[in-house]
């Protein structure tokens, strides 16, 4: 216990200020998520200064809610307000000032808050916090009793993951990700068999199936609803070279079809598994001898001390604690590897699974992931 004369009052006051900042930031994060989901940022980016009613009309939303949302956005400095035309009288019991005020979204702010700004639309990530807040009671129970929270408890998580993938993977797929493997694009044009393990809604392989009709694409995922979504989308688009299969990859090292695929991918999927080692051994087993495995996964170190300067380290550890680690522990025998398993652990696990060559790449557009090119 510190003696009184060792207590640093300045440090305590600074930390108190930080706590207030965190409370405000946490609150505004929810408002960012709402602004993204309702399209308010996208609407405001295309408008001159406008009243809450004008913004609500353009967005086809309820004005009263829009007005209060604008209050939060203005108080936080995300949105600017022009009040010079307002009356100086009082309108007791009514929000006269707010109704007449004109609000605008600065262009500089729109560059990381709108869908047009992808892949720099950070508003997409704000949705994770609201979703994770919905399972806080379950997570607290896990702290007390162990175990985990099953995937199906997370509501829109897969939808947000698909949106995340839509701006970190899809726009970069042809120009930056596939070229990490020399000659791969030419082989896809000629015709190969590709597997996406832990595919979610399968946006990446759906895009590839359209672009490379001579190749065959298969997606495996644990959740039946995302598999149904993928197959329905493949049928809607007439992609007969694409199929999705419900598959628990916990025992993939036993039930993988040997040497069946020329190219295998996983996008932020390994660390969520109940048995990541089994999944990696299954990928090695199902990969042709001259095939290649591309794994996108969280960019960090296995040692917490090395992540002190990570630009989104607190966010990644939080998502790991409240989702990635927990969905693994919710499964029988789940390892609970967590999102921050790190490069060191990843490379060891690739080698243990029978891969001899592991190259690690970082891409400028993607601050949260690195890309492993892995070969037998």
Image (tube, helix red, strand yellow):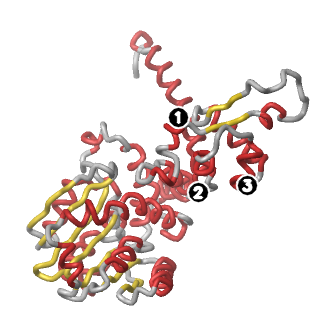
Residue 61 tag number:
3
User: Which residue is located at x 42 percent, y 49 percent?
Assistant: 120
- Label pair 2/3, CB-CB below 8 angstroms: no
Name the side, left or right, on which 103 lies relative to 159.
Answer: right
Q: Where 191 sits versus 68, above or below?
A: below
* Badge 2 or badge 3: first in the primary sequence: 3
Task: Kindly report which numbered mark, 3 or 1, lies closer to the viewer in this rendering.
Answer: 3
User: Which residue is located at x 21 percent, y 87 percent?
Assistant: 260
* Badge 3 or badge 1: first in the primary sequence: 1
Residue highlighted by disc 2: 134
Q: Where 78 sits versus 56, above or below?
A: above
Residue extending farthest to the top is: 5
Label 2 neighbour load within 10 Å: few <14, some 14-19, many 20+? few
Label 1 neighbour load within 10 Å: few <14, some 14-19, many 20+? few
The location of residue 192, given as percent across then percent down, is 22, 84
Residue highlighted by disc 1: 22
Name the side, left or right, on which 105 lies relative to 211.
Answer: right
The location of residue 60, given as percent across then percent down, is 72, 57
Of 374 and 1, the residue lying toward us: 374
Name the quadrant containing residue 4. top left
Of 22 and 39, the residue lying toward us: 39
The location of residue 216, given as percent across then percent down, is 30, 86
User: Which residue is located at x 40 percent, y 62 percent?
Assistant: 165
- Label pair 3/1, CB-CB below 8 angstroms: no
- Residue 72 visible at all: no
């Amino acid at each position: 216990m510190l003696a009184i004369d060792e207590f640093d009052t300045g440090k305590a006051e600074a930390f108190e200020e930080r706590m207030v900042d965190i409370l405000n930031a946490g609150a505004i994060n929810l408002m960012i998520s709402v602004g993204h989901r309702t399209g308010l940022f996208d609407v405001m980016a295309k408008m001159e200064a406008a009243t809450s009613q004008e913004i609500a009309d353009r967005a086809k939303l309820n004005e009263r809610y829009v007005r209060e949302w604008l209050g939060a956005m203005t108080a936080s400095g995300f949105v600017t307000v022009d009040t010079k035309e307002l009356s100086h009288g009082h309108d007791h019991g009514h929000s006269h000032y707010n109704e007449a005020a004109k609000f605008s979204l600065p262009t500089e702010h729109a560059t990381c808050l709108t869908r047009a700004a992808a892949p720099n639309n950070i508003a997409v990530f704000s949705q994770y916090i609201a979703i994770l807040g919905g399972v806080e009671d379950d997570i607290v129970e896990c702290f007390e009793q162990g175990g985990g929270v099953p995937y199906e408890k997370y509501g829109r998580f897969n939808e947000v993951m698909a949106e995340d993938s839509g701006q970190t993977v899809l726009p970069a797929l042809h120009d930056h990700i596939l070229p990490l493997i020399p000659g791969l694009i030419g082989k896809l044009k000629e015709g190969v068999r590709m597997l996406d393990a832990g595919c979610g809604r399968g946006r990446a392989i759906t895009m590839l199936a359209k672009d490379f009709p001579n190749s065959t694409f298969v997606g495996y995922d644990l959740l039946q609803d995302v598999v149904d979504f993928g197959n329905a989308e493949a049928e809607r688009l007439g992609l007969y070279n694409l199929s999705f299969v419900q598959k628990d990859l916990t025992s993939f090292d036993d039930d993988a079809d040997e040497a069946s695929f020329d190219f295998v991918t996983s996008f932020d999927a390994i660390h969520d598994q109940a048995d990541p080692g089994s999944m990696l051994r299954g990928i090695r087993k199902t990969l042709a001898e001259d095939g290649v495995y591309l794994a996108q996964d969280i960019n960090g170190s296995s040692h917490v001390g090395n992540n002190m300067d990570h630009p989104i380290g607190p966010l990644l550890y939080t998502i790991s604690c409240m989702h990635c680690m927990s969905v693994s522990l919710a499964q029988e025998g789940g390892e609970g590897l967590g999102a921050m398993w790190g490069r060191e652990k990843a490379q060891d696990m690739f080698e243990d699974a029978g891969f001899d060559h592991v190259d690690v790449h970082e891409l400028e557009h993607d601050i949260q992931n690195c890309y492993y090119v892995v070969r037998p």
